[in-house]
Structure formats: C-alpha cells, structure tokens
Image: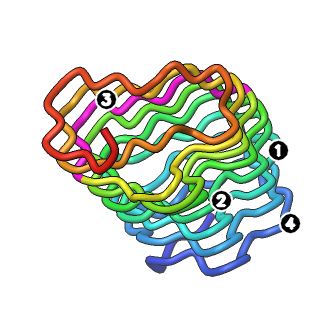
Amino acid sequence: YVQTGTAINRSLFAYTHLETFVFPEKTDSIGSYAFAHCGLKQIKLPENVTLFEGAFQNDSLLTTVIFPKNTCLYSGKVFDNCSMLQQLSFNNVKYFSAYGISNMSSLTNITFNGTLQHIDGMGAISNCPKLKNVDFRGPVISTSRSQLISNCPQLEKVTFYGPVLEASFETPENCPAFKGYMIKDVLCYSRTL
C-alpha cells in the first residue's frame, strides 16, 4: 500500500504479482508499465488520473476496471493483452491516444459515458476479436483523421448518442461485420460524411 506521492513511477510494480492495490487519493499519474505483468484482479482508478503507455499491460487476471469521473490522459496500450477484461466503461476523458485499446481478446463492449474531448491516432481501438459495440453516450468534441478502428472482426456498430462537434468517420479496417456509424444527435462537422 502506497500512502504518499502523486505519481506511480514507470515500472514501479511490474512483475510483482500483486492481486490488489489501493491507489492513494491524490495519485495523478500511473507511469508506463507501472503495473505490467502484476496479476491484479480489479482496480479502481483515482480521479483525474493520467494513464501512460502499458500501465497495466499483460495483467491477465484483471477482470474489472472502475474508471474515475474524469480521466486526463489515456495513452496507448494501457490494458494491452489484458485477456480477461470483457468491457471498458469510461466517464469523462480529456485525451484518448492512438492504440489506446488494443490486443484485448475478451473485450466485447466499450462505452464512453461522459464527454470525450479528443480521440486520436491510428488504431485507437484495434485487435479486439470479440468487440461488438462501441458507444459514445456523451458529447464528442473531436476525433482524429486517422483510421480509429481496425482488426475487430465482430464489430457491428459505433453509436454516438450525444452531439459530435468534429469527426472523421473512416471505415474501420478489417472489420467485416461492421454495419456503420449511428449518429443519434447533432453532427456539426464531418470530414468524411
């Protein structure tokens, strides 16, 4: 149990075989590979946290992630190869990076419940063979011009329930079951539709 500090440093707990970890309330960043290969089963992330690349990579026993009300930055491959995670449910996210969700063999659903200020880069969601739905329930301010989704063969739809200010809707690559994007609210500007 860590009681002080605002950052969990790079690789600090990697390969330590932790099953549980309670984050200090003031933790504002979790460094690259900080908990990689640990064996954590469930985590509750602290408020306004920044998650760096591979922070929980290869935690093969991880089944539950509780996201805070606000996440500042979600970098690439945070949960890469977390083979037991079946769903991710984000709240407000300021910035979601390229390869943010990748190589997750059991993931079936992704939900963004709050405001997403920007989702960026090639393959933000990639290599998730069981993924069927991606839902954006709150406003989306902007998306990248890059191919956001790739190699998700069971992905059927991406639904935007809230307003979308600026977006690029490229056809997902290697997603043969994909039926399309559903926009249920206002779309202010699209570079591709």
Residue placed at 18% from the left, 46% from the top? 189
Q: Position of residue 53 (x, y in %)?
A: 62, 69
Tell me the element at label 3.
strand
Q: Residues within 10 Å of mark 1 (few under 14, many from 20)?
A: many
Give the labeled residue for mark 1: 60
Quarter of the figure with the N terminus: bottom right
Q: Nearer the viewer, residue 142 or 114?
A: 142
User: What amino acid is found at the position of numbered circle 2 in the picture?
Assistant: Lys
Stretch in magenta: 130-141
Residue 134 in magenta stretch: yes
Foreground label between 4 and 3:
3
User: What amino acid is found at the position of numbered circle 4 in the picture?
Assistant: Tyr
State the separation of the CA atoms marked 4 and 3: 38 Å
Give the labeled residue for mark 4: 15
Earlier in the chain: of badge 1 and badge 4, it is 4
Residue placed at 48% from the left, 30% from the top? 134
State the separation of the CA atoms marked 1 and 2: 14 Å
Earlier in the chain: of badge 1 and badge 2, it is 1
Residue placed at 79% from the left, 69% from the top? 14
Quarter of the figure with the C terminus: top left
Q: Position of residue 11 (x, y in %)?
A: 73, 76
Q: Residues within 10 Å of mark 4 (few under 14, many from 20)?
A: some
User: What amino acid is found at the position of numbered circle 3 in the picture?
Assistant: Phe
